[in-house]
Structures are given as structure tokens and as C-alpha cells.
Amino acid sequence: MRSIWNGTLGFGLVSIPVKLYSATEQARLDLDMLDKHDLSKIKYQRINENTGKEVKWGDIVKGYKLEDEYIVLGNEDFEKANAKKTKTIEIDDFVEEKDIDSIYFDKPYYLEPEKSGRKPYALLREALKRTGKVGVATFVLRQKENLAIVRTNKEVIVLNKIRFQSEVRDFNDLNLPMDIDLDNKQLDMAVQLIDQYTTEFDVSAYKDNYTEELQALIKQKASGKETRQPEKEVTPTKSKDLMAQLKASLEEKKKKAS
């Protein structure tokens, strides 16, 4: 793996030199954009809107429009804004992970200690395990301040970016069913159905079947075989059929279990 950031993980007066690695990767197929007339690859160019000419990467700078004028910013300017946050993941607080709503979770990264930081890394890892707490930290990555939690996953310390409250949309604008009279028998049966489907979570039990099926379809098309779209129509359950559908669901689960 290639590290995407080098800096320091800090808690209290303890500083741990670390490297940051992306903990996830895309599993979807690598599809190219093609011209449907001759299947030529589509190229994307960076065009100067005034001259219409292509601009090389080395000639591109970043700028912020202030009133009617662009202020050009270089890498050194982003560091000058807050040099510490560009090089330090600073843990400000420790909290219970269960207190953080899952809607705030974003992207996970692995933290690896530099040679000189192995002992304090191990110390923080074991202290997090013993307390069951996670650290809440802030740092700057790719010219953006990020909020994150620092937690353990087996023997590695994971930095999980989480969203700021301002980045989560308010759901109060949605048309949600708030004044619905629910039948207690239906509710009891829905709870029973949930109980029947309840199991220990094992992520390895879930597979990316769609990608496999898409690859199989590609092979079929490559061999000249006809591909058909499976007929599957989902009909929303009507209120009058709700009890019958719940009963049928419970019976189906019992049959699968037997």
C-alpha cells in the first residue's frame, strides 16, 4: 500500500509519527467511456475557456474568486493557514463510539507508526482497547479540514473520517409518515419478523453479487449469446394486505429454517 499522508498523531503531550493509508478500495468494474459510433475512448481535456486551448497540468493553479479578482493559492499557502493541522491529527476528546450516529461516518484509513513511534502507537492502541473509547480528532487533508475518530480494529489504529454536523442534511423537509395509526397486532408481528431474521453480524457472509453477475453478462455478450433481462416486478404492499404479507413472511422464514 502507498501512504497518502505523513504526519503526527497527537493526544495530550504524546506525539506519534504516523503514515495514513486508505483502508478501502472500489470493487466495481473498471468501465471506459466510449464513442458509440466507433467505440473510441473518450479523452478529457483541461481547456482554457478564453483561448479554447488545452492547458498542461503543470500550468494549472488553484484560485479563490474574491469579488471580481482571483487570488492564486499555492501549496505553501494552504500550510500557512494552519501549519499544525496540515501535519498533525490532534485528538481533542475521547468518547463512547456508540454515541456517534452512523450517519456521520465517512471514510476509514489505517494509521501505521514510523519506526520511532512504535511504542507510543502500541500504548495508545492498548489504552483504547482497555477503555473501549474512541478519540475525536481534527486534521487537514487535501486542503480541507476533517473531523475524525481514532479507534482500534484488532491490531491497527483506524482513523475514520466523520462528517461535521453542518454536512448532514436536515430530514425535516421530507414527507414522513408521522401521524399513522398502527395496529398493535401488526406491530407485534413486525417485531417477531425482525426477531426471526436477527443474527450475529458477519461481513464475510455478504458478497458483491452484482459485479459477478455483470461480469457473467459481459462474457455472454462477448461470446455472442443473447442476454435477457429477468422479469422481476416489485409491488408495494397495500395497507389492507399488510397483515397477510407479515404472516407469509414469518411462514417463509420458518420454512427456510427447517
Image (cartoon, rainbow, N blue to C red):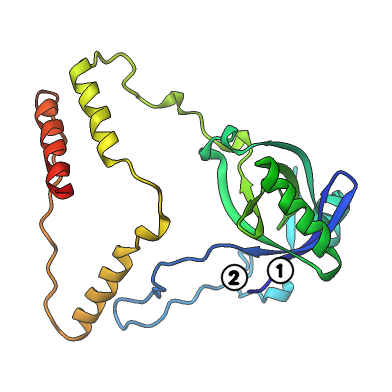
Identify residue type, mark 1. Answer: Ile
Identity of the residue furthest to the right in this view: 13
User: Foreground residue, 167 or 258?
Assistant: 258
Q: Residue 188's quadrant in the figure?
A: top left
**Category of crowding for the residue at label 2, using alpha-carbon neighbours closer than 10 angstroms: few (below 14), some (14–19), many (at least 20):** few
Task: Identify the element where label 1 is drawn.
Answer: loop
Q: Residue at x 83, y 63 (%)?
A: 117
Q: Is 92 located above or below residue 60 in the figure?
A: above
Residue 219 is situated, as x and y percent measured from the top left of the image, at: 24, 81
Task: Identify the element where label 2 is drawn.
Answer: loop
Can residue 197 be seen in the rendering of this structure? yes
**Category of crowding for the residue at label 1, using alpha-carbon neighbours closer than 10 angstroms: few (below 14), some (14–19), many (at least 20):** few
User: Foreground residue, 48 or 102?
Assistant: 102
Q: Residue at x 24, y 13 (%)?
A: 181
Q: Residue at x 22, y 16 (%)?
A: 184
Q: Residue at x 37, y 76 (%)?
A: 34
Q: In the figure, is residue 11 to the left or right of 178?
A: right
Residue 140 is situated, as x and y percent measured from the top left of the image, at: 75, 52
Q: CA distance from mark 2 to mark 1?
A: 9 Å
User: Foreground residue, 198 or 51?
Assistant: 198
Identify residue type, mark 2. Answer: Arg
Q: Which mark is residue 60?
A: 1
Can residue 146 be seen in the rendering of this structure? no
Q: In the figure, is residue 4 to the left or right of 233?
A: right
User: Foreground residue, 176 or 193?
Assistant: 193
For mark 2, what is the residue? 46
Q: In the figure, is residue 156 to the left or right of 26?
A: right
Q: Is 86 located above or below residue 191 in the figure?
A: below
Residue 171 is situated, as x and y percent measured from the top left of the image, at: 45, 28
Q: Is 255 located above or below residue 93 in the figure?
A: below
Residue 41 is situated, as x and y percent measured from the top left of the image, at: 41, 80
Q: Are marks 2 and 1 in contact (CB under 8 Å)?
A: yes
